[in-house]
Image (cartoon, grey):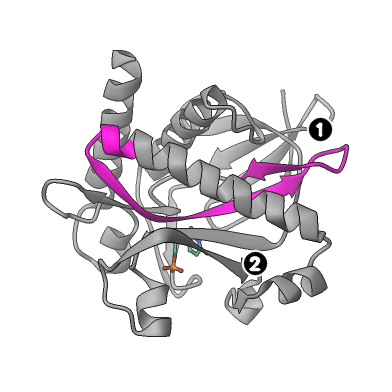
Amino acid sequence: MKGSLLYEGKAKKVYTTDQPQQLILSYKNDATAFNGKKKDAFEGKGRLNNLITSKVFEYLHQHDINSHFIQSLNDTEQLVHQTTIVPLEVVVRNVAAGSITRRLGIEERTPFTPPIVELFYKNDELNDPILNDAHAYHLTDVTESELMQIKGMALEVNEQLKALFKDVGLQLVDFKLEFGRVEDGSIVLADEISPDTCRLWDIETGDKMDKDVFRENIGNLIETYENILQRLEAYTCAK
Ligand code: C5P
């Protein structure tokens, strides 16, 4: 049973439940970019991100990658294990796009082999600055072995998701993960994995099929996310 509102973020609301250590995530229709400087709302976006994230976490569970995800409850809500979020955004990049092209002057669509892992400090006031490992130890409670575990998991998620998206005709360009601590102190994958948090390009056309359609005003966000969900649903039905 859904309890009280615990926290409201830019894309989700978090509610308590009658079960200890379990929370309900409710996906909102709001879209934000450039650290909240660009804002809009799209009817149906919450449903799409809830259903896409649920499919992705179910796929990862089947491939031995555990997360906070327990189950999808309805169109816009999912049940998760309670975690204390580690304030790091872990980005994995297979191809250059977004901030790395501006920060390092690398041309968009340049491939990265092996993939590049970057850490950012999850802090809106500071605009989520990029960090090195020493900064991460100073600013968070992660240990050296936990940071190794986090980066290893991020690369494993990359391998699994590259294969999943390739099977549905999409190139996984980059994505952002968050991790949280559960009650016993161990670290699990948390938050969401959706077109809000990944860059996905159509393998045949090269079209951008993720939040960049909103960031760059280059298409219809709802039609794009619906297309991603339909591809993932067709894939899971065929398996
Ligand atoms: O903006 P940047 O190029 O660093 O983003 C890399 C990846 O991380 C993109 O897929 C983007 O959608 C995701 N990201 C995110 N939340 C942030 C920053 C980036 O989901 N706060």
Residue span colored magenta? 165-190
Classify 76 as above or below 126. above
Residue 189 appears left or right of 105: right
Q: Examine the image and state in which quarter residue 97 appears.
A: bottom left
Q: Find residue 122 and name its label.
A: 2
Kindly indicate whether the residue at mark 2 contacts the one at mark 1 (C-beta within 8 angstroms): no
Marks 1/2: CA–CA distance = 23 Å
Q: Nearer the viewer, residue 113 or 63?
A: 113
Q: Find residue 21 and name its label.
A: 1
Residue 117 appears left or right of 144: left
Residue at x 34%, y 15% (from the top left corner): 239
Among numbered discs 1 and 2, the one appearing first in the sequence? 1
Three-letter code for the amino acid on which mark 2 is drawn: Lys
Query: Taking the image as drawn, is residue 193 in sight?
Result: no
**Mark 2 within 8 Å of ligand 1, using the beta carbon:** yes
**Where residue 38 sits: x, y (%)?**
40, 71
Q: Is residue 15 magenta?
A: no
**Where residue 31 sits: x, y (%)?**
42, 58
* Secondary-structure class at tag 1: loop
* Secondary-structure class at tag 2: loop
Q: Examine the image and state in which quarter residue 79 appears.
A: top right
Query: Taking the image as drawn, is residue 157 in sight?
Result: yes
Classify 159 as above or below 105. above
Q: Badge 2: how crowded within 10 Å, few (<14), some, or many (20+)?
A: some
Residue at x 58%, y 31% (from the top left corner): 78
Q: Nearer the viewer, residue 145 or 238?
A: 145
Q: Nearer the viewer, residue 186 or 11?
A: 186
Three-letter code for the amino acid on which mark 1 is drawn: Gln
**Which of the two discs, 1 and 2, sits closer to the camera?**
2
